[in-house]
Amino acid sequence: MMGKTHLAIGAVLALAMLPVLNPANKIVFVAIAVGCALLPDLDHPNSTINNRLIITKPISWFFRHRGFLHSIWPLAIGFLALSAYNPVYATAFIVGYASHLIGDAITKEGINFLHPFSTFRIQGPFLTGTLAESIFFVGLLGLIIFQVWHLVI
């Protein structure tokens, strides 16, 4: 998936979690989740996050794209580390990071949730950067507008 689609999936899931979790600061919760939706692509030198935060680009030198950073291990490590600081923000991290993994899992390239301990990949029907992804993205934008509308009213 493209960076904008990952951001949209992260926003949809974060907004869906607001009524369930009722965080004290809803804007910060959504912002953390949306930002974390880009983190797994630190392993790709031309990803949205690496093009915006040049300082993170060297991370892509050490990880293969859709390898370790696209597994459940950084998700678990990040959650455990953040839980000691703030459980609500740790949950926002989980929502955002997991949204990225879900998004990439529905592409034809797929991901390996248990890398490096398994070679099993979960794959879906989408090709990254195609019309189908663009249509999916527009649908996500509509869902975001719907969710925000219902939060405001």
Image (spheres, rainbow, N blue to C red):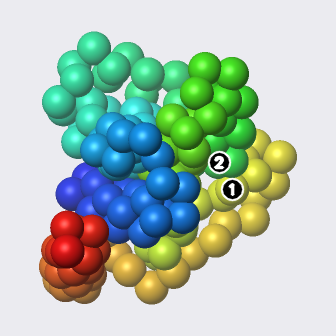
Q: Which residue is mark 2?
A: 71
Residue 36 is situated, as x and y percent measured from the top left of the image, at 41, 41
Q: Amino acid at mark 1?
A: Phe
User: Horizontally, is 97 left or right of 31 in the view?
Assistant: right
> CB of mark 1 within 8 Å of CB of mark 2?
yes
Residue 75 is situated, as x and y percent measured from the top left of the image, at 63, 41
Screen quadrant of the N terminus: bottom left
Q: CA distance from mark 1 to mark 2?
A: 4 Å
Q: Quadrant of residue 10?
A: bottom left
Q: Amino acid at mark 2?
A: Ser
Which residue is painted at 36% across and 63% down in the image? 15
User: Horizontally, is 143 left or right of 61 in the view?
Assistant: left
Residue 63 is situated, as x and y percent measured from the top left of the image, at 53, 31
User: Horizontally, is 43 left or right of 54 in the view?
Assistant: right
Which residue is painted at 69% across and 56% down in the image? 113
- The one nearer the camera, 56 or 150, is 150
- The residue positioned farthest toward the front in the image shown: 153
Which residue is painted at 54% across and 56% down in the image? 21
Element type where label 2 sits in the image = loop
Callout 2 crowding tier (Cα within 10 Å): few <14, some 14–19, many ≥20: some
- The one nearer the camera, 8 or 144, is 144
Label drawn at residue 113: 1
- The one nearer the camera, 153 or 137, is 153
Q: Quadrant of residue 110?
A: bottom right
Give whichever of discs 1 and 2 has the lower sequence position: 2
Query: Can residue 70 be seen from the camera position used here?
Result: yes
